[in-house]
Amino acid sequence: MTQLMKAAKSGTKDGLEKTKIAVMRKVTFLHRKEAPGDSEEEDTGFLEVTVSDMKHPPPELGPMPAGLSPQQVVRRHILGSIVQSERSYVDSLKRILQDYRNPLMEMEPKVLSARKCQVVFFRLKEILQCHSMFQIALASRVAEWDSAEKIGDLFVASFSKSMVLDVYSDYVNNFTTAMSLIKKACLTKPAFLDFLKKRQMASADRVTLYGLMVKPIQRFPQFILLLQDMLKNTPKGHADRLSLQLALTELETLAEKLNEQKRVADQVAEIQQLCKSISDRSSLNKLLSSGQRQLLLCETLTETVYGDRGQLIKSKERKVFLLNDMLVCANINFKPVNPRGQLEISSLVPLGPKYVVKWSTALPQVQVVEVGQESGAYDKDNVVIHNAGAKKHAPTGPASHNKVYLGPPRLFQELQDLQKDLAVVEQITLLISTLHGTYQNLNMTVAQDWCLALQRMMKVKEEEIHSANKCRLRLLLPGKPDKSGRPISVMVVFITPSPLSKISWVNRLHLAKIGLREENQPGWLCPDEDKKSKAPFWCPILSCHMSAFSSKALDLQLGAAVHNPVQSSLLGFSAISTSLPQGYLWVGGGQEGAGGQVEIFSLNRSVPRTVKSFPVASPVLCMEYIPEATEGDTTGTEETRAGTEQPPTALHPTVCLGLQDGSIAVYGSVDTGTQCLLTCKSPGMQPVLCLKHSSEYLFAGLQDGTVAAYPRNNGGLWDLAGRPTCLTVGTGPVRALLTLDETVWASCANQVTVLDASSLRTQQTFEAHPDAEASVTHMIKAGSGVWMAFSLGSSIRLFHTETLEHLQEINIATRTTFVLPGQKHVRVTSLLICQGLLWVGTDQGIIVLLPVPRLEGIPKITGKGMVSLNGHGGPVEFLAVALSTLAPDVLKGNQEEEEGEEEKTPELDGPPPREMRKKGILLQYRLRSTAHLPGQLLSVRDAPAGTSGTPEHTEEDGSIYEMADDPDVWVRSRPCARDAPRKEISSVAIISGGRGYRNFSAEPQRRGGEADSTLLIWQVPLML
């Protein structure tokens, strides 16, 4: 119709001809009402290009020439894989169109309407065109491979076009709808199912239509893996290396954008489904349709109800929605379509609304209660709901006046009964030992067996209690007041599909509540859409701001901070979800011309707590955390440490401080008592401006332009007593050091000197800024690039780690003007890269966040980013990251490794399955398997990403958004019954330090000159 309108408006001589063509092309639209999909596809401005195999034969790799190096042979094989996989992919796309779409469109009578065909096969023609053009370019590269060996720039040119993102985004976002249409048609139209079966049987590889249609979703992850392999086998200095890194960046950015758009599309679809199930007049409908609600998490959980003896009364699946300010629980609506009321397979197709809302509660009133934390829950006279992570005391009394209560079985009561029985049996044993006669069933052996049996039962019961916490999400909700008007709380218990899911729910609930605080409403500005754009759901949340030093008597300035990660086995399973990353935060500073101060905070909680503070001789200018290394890092014993309690071989992490008076001090970690293990003075007593370590040396950047390198000694510590190797890199101060794999970069004025990390010889020096006055103040590495900040100007610059080429420049002032209009003179005072985000601190106290790729490509800034509305009154003195990882192996029992493979599928409505009661130390949990869920195991392909968790795209799950054949997955959106292999769970917090705290949306005036040194701590959702 649009073309008809255009033809009519143009009024040219060929207008009539255009109209005729338009009419001919729109026959289905004009004749059949149900084909609006047709016009949709035609109108989007994609040019149809047919590529003939005769004119453009597919790429073919010729015979291998002689005399190639082993690396060249490997690169040739990887190129062969790229060619072969691309040919197979294009063939699959052609098969979908030729074997399925075209016959379905032409079939009479139609088993699938033309409109439904358009929806099912939406954008496939355009995807085929993109790859047909790519294949032509690939063929020319393959032909000249042996002379040029270049392919990276081809990927950049082919996949950086906006058209590629548009067509793939449309396809990915439509995929769930397309699959639902196919499934429904299979259930309701036997002829359609028959058609699919025949087509599958007729194909040589027997791949289903689903198997073919999931391939576009897997394509970019496959490309990324192939390019990573190619990059690993491309030596430094090769002409293709930078192009490959840029190509990897391009594909990763594309995949990230697809993920984000898919997540937003899914969120909108779920909220729409929820809206459909609520009456238009209800307040909940108005809240949902206002567009202000973000869906943080939704998942199918099993609600369980227990009787007063702990027996299971009923269990039912519910869809639970965590919105940014409320929790909604809905029944999943399945109605039997058979008139006799019999349940058939077609009953899995929802009729009418998909959900029926059961209850909804404002988030601040929802409280997570772990097993053993019930006390406040049953105090009906005074129900005050505090922070979800707050510790509770032992239960004050049983809820005897409730006939049925919602909670787990009375595991604690059973455990206490066993303990009492054991005490009785021990007394009986004592009595038996006094018997004079010998009796068959009444002797010490039997009595000891009873004791052992009871102890074993207690052990099982303790493990059941921890199992109950592992997959049980217990929520305390406000109920209706009773007749006397007393507030009543209701306990709702959900079984999560896996322990990971439980962690995710507790973590998101905790952060969503923090997100409702005034300072986080809003916390960030996204400059994309005239300041109005909402911050994405993954954005960091300001969890607290606090004074950096406990001593208020001195006016202490901040110098530096480092995180000392410590694995705390005492931290409970759910505490992981709400506490900051495990370990200690060291903060150093001092007073100009006076002494310095170090403050150490414990982070094993939701708000940091000072555990130690001590003075040092002079203000702290820099800090370096040195972890335990395999070669034997850090705090070994020294001759200077007389009377130490530790054995001479003990090596622990250390923290090195660089002071204004030229001292370098090495301290043991908190767990070893934070003793000062070593001190020394720098050559010439020069202030130590920066510290970095490699496996062999501790490097100190000094005020006079030298870098002092202290070697390790036999004890694993630095040899500070001997004379260090001094390397002169300039006349000005060495403001920044950066250790890369084999080199150390040292900055002096606007120059950066690259030193060999082993021989300490200068490799080369390059100019990082055209202005000689602009000193390099910060250097931070990500992937194959280094971002630098300078003492003058508001720009940051990106350099390649290998060619030292300048790749990108970003002006930070263009972002900060959104918060402080008119302030054009901005200086960058701190830099940090963490998990795909570049944090930039400025002299105005504003913090800017810019997205960068995570893989080993080039960390180019690929989006507009965000500006924090929370900052400091003065310059951001430092940005530090606290990161702790919880490897699944650490969180598993010893015997679970082997047995994980052979798990059965026990019923869900019994007590926790035996698989979850493995012997082993308490608080060690399995995090991988969800095989105990009902529903068949889908072992044919990788697990799909469920609707829960972050939509992060990783190398392992190439089948992101994949839908399984199990109806549980595609109708109920229940995650598949086997998790993808996971490497670890990451907990991340970002700490900024500066004068005072300032909310830019609330306080236009500047204050902070006389304010105390303050820490701001941001948390990001757990990376599961």
Image (cartoon, rainbow, N blue to C red):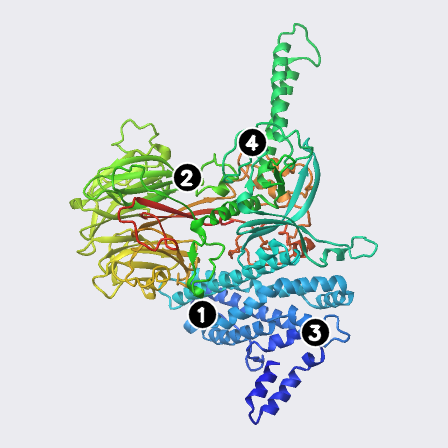
Q: Which residue is mark 3?
A: 34
Q: Amino acid at mark 2?
A: Val
Marking on residue 375? 4
Q: Amino acid at mark 4?
A: Ser
Q: CA distance from mark 2 to mark 3?
A: 63 Å
Q: Disc 2 on helix, strand or loop?
A: loop
Give amino acid for label 1: Val
Left or right position of 402 against 567:
right
Quick one: label 1 or label 3, which is nearer the N terminus? 3
Quarter of the image with the N terminus in it: bottom right
- Is 830 left, or right, of 337 in this rendering? left
Instruction: Mark 4: give few (<14), some (14-19) or many (20+) Cα within 10 Å.
Output: some
Earlier residue among tags 2 and 3: 3
Camera-nearest label, 3 or 4: 4
The residue mark sitting in front, 4 or 2, is 4
The residue indicated by pointer 2 is: 566
Please, what secondary structure does the residue beneath circle 4 have?
helix
Residue at 38% across, 68% down: 239
The disc at residue 156 is: 1
Q: Which badge, 4 or 2, comes first in the chain's sequence?
A: 4
- Expressed as whole percent of the image width and height from the top left, the position of residue 215 reads 59, 64
